[in-house]
Image (cartoon, rainbow, N blue to C red):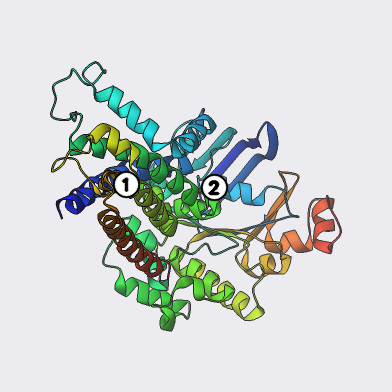
């Protein structure tokens, strides 16, 4: 396997003195889709925020592209811009669809983005809604705009935090296909948080189970579902409660 | 007409000054967490309710000959009984209003949207600008509220301006004077002009608000 893109060591995140995440060791490899699964409240979204450098770890180090960050120093903007997140809710700006999609490029000083926006909107099937106010879209359409807004940036890492929760099967299928294509054609590294273990099975190359803020097991998808190494993983895959 | 023009100049300039100062303060308080922030917010809310006449008194004492600024010769420090002193007093009244309402508008923006903005690669300044843009309806309300307060204000401008004919007389102080003189027709006419100006400005703001919130 190639050198990891991310390497987390002894990473801890605490809020008001209460530890919510403790990762002894976790690596994310270039070009892979790593799914993080586990019950609600085990720290999956917190882990994504750390990977996106939205919050610093309380303890430990995050190595990203060979540079080590320990929460004491500011992560350079150029590094931060290599990673972006699509959240469970699309969080669109109160602007047109095309303005939302172009937003990240504008932040980077790219003002002439018309062709790129048109191309990306076509890829998510929203070329006819470019002029529409983003907040008038349906839930599925809004999430596809959120995905387009991330896609256009061509980040090294795309973090997906329950991107298809509460969506209808048509939009789930469409978003999964876009994710699969982005990963295959651009070798984009992705970390997917999902409650849907079938989605993890469909999309991920590797799966990690988090329980009580700790990684219980990380394994290739096939192994994770068919020959789990930890009894808690086996119980989770069977659908048993594993709190 | 001179009175109307001076009223517009004084209140318009004070509004501009308070917008330029108040919006960044409000945005900063709404977005950043720091030690002592609740205390600063409490001070801001208190300042929002300050009686204009007390502000006028403070500015008067500050600019009077024996005041801390009265003895300094500088083009940046206005003299008492000038339109500039009236602008200063009205700015002091309006800044907390603009800052306070802007802060409330920014606090109303979903914190997770701010996280999304940051995740898309915004610098702290870009994050602040985008959040303000999302809170734009509230920011317009902040400006309208401040204008309403200073355009109708009489105590502070009377104290620091002195209501001098041809120099510092504005619509509100003229209404007071004409009423005292018993010239009720003129006082009412001036009052109607004042209300008319407020109506035009607020209607313009309302149209702007509807356009930006679409």
Q: Residue furthest bottom?
A: A128
Which residue position is annotated with label 1? B19
| Residue B165 in sight here | yes
Position above or below: A17 against A82? above
Q: Position of residue A226 (x, y in %)?
A: 78, 63
Secondary structure beneath disc 1? helix
Is the Cβ of the residue at disc 2 closer than 8 Å to that at disc 1? no
Q: Which mark is residue A51?
A: 2
| Residue A109 in sight here | no
Secondary structure beneath disc 2? helix
Image mark 2: chain? A
Q: Position of residue B179 (x, y in %)?
A: 30, 47
Q: How busy is the neighbourhood of tag 2: few (under 14 within 10 Å), some, or many (20 plus)?
A: many
The residue depicted at 34 percent of the width and 26 percent of the height is B58
Q: Is residue A26 left or right of residue B32?
A: right
Q: Position of residue A214 (x, y in %)?
A: 72, 43
**Number of marks drawn:** 2
Q: Is residue B69 left or right of residue B25?
A: left
Q: Is residue A110 left or right of residue A28?
A: left
**Which mark is in front, 2 or 1?**
1
């Amino acid at each position: 396997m190639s050198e990891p893109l991310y390497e987390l060591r002894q990473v801890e995140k605490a809020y008001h003195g209460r530890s919510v995440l403790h990762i002894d060791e976790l690596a994310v490899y270039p070009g892979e889709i790593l799914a993080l699964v586990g019950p609600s409240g085990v720290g999956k979204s917190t882990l994504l925020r750390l990977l996106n450098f939205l919050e610093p770890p309380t303890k430990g180090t995050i190595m990203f592209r060979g540079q080590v960050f320990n929460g004491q120093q500011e992560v350079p903007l150029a590094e931060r811009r290599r990673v972006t997140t699509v959240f469970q809710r699309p969080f669109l700006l109160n602007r047109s669809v095309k303005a939302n999609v172009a937003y990240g490029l504008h932040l980077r000083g790219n003002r002439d983005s018309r062709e790129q926006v048109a191309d990306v909107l076509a890829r998510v099937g929203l070329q006819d809604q470019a002029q529409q106010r983003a907040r008038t879209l349906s839930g599925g359409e809004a999430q596809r705009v959120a995905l387009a807004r991330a896609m256009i940036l061509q980040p090294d890492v795309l973090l997906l935090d329950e991107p298809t929760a509460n969506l209808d099967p048509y939009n789930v299928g469409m978003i999964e296909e876009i994710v699969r294509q982005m990963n295959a054609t651009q070798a984009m590294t992705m970390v997917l948080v999902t409650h849907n273990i079938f989605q993890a099975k469909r999309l991920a190359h590797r799966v990690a189970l988090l329980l009580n803020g700790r990684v219980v097991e990380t394994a290739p998808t096939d192994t994770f579902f068919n020959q789990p190494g930890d009894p808690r993983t086996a119980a989770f895959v069977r659908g048993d409660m594993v709190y | 007409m001179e009175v109307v023009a001076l009223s517009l100049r004084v209140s318009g300039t004070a509004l501009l000054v308070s917008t330029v100062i108040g919006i960044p303060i409000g945005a900063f308080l709404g977005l950043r967490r720091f030690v002592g922030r609740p205390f600063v917010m409490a001070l801001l809310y208190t300042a929002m309710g300050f009686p204009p006449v007390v502000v006028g008194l403070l500015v008067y004492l500050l600019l009077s000959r024996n005041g801390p600024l009265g003895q300094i010769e500088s083009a940046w420090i206005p003299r008492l009984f000038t339109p500039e002193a009236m602008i200063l007093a009205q700015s002091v009244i309006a800044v907390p209003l603009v800052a306070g309402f802007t802060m409330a508008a920014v606090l109303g923006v979903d914190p997770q949207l701010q996280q999304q903005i940051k995740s898309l690669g915004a610098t702290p300044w870009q994050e602040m600008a985008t959040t303000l843009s999302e809170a734009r309806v509230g920011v317009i309300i902040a400006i309208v509220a401040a204008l309403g307060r200073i355009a109708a204000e009489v105590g502070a401008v009377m104290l620091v301006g002195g209501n001098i004919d041809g120099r510092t007389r504005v619509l509100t102080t003229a209404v007071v004077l004409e009423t005292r003189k018993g010239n009720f027709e003129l006082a009412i006419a001036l009052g109607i002009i004042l209300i008319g100006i407020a109506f035009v400005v607020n209607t313009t703001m309302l149209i702007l608000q509807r356009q930006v919130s679409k």
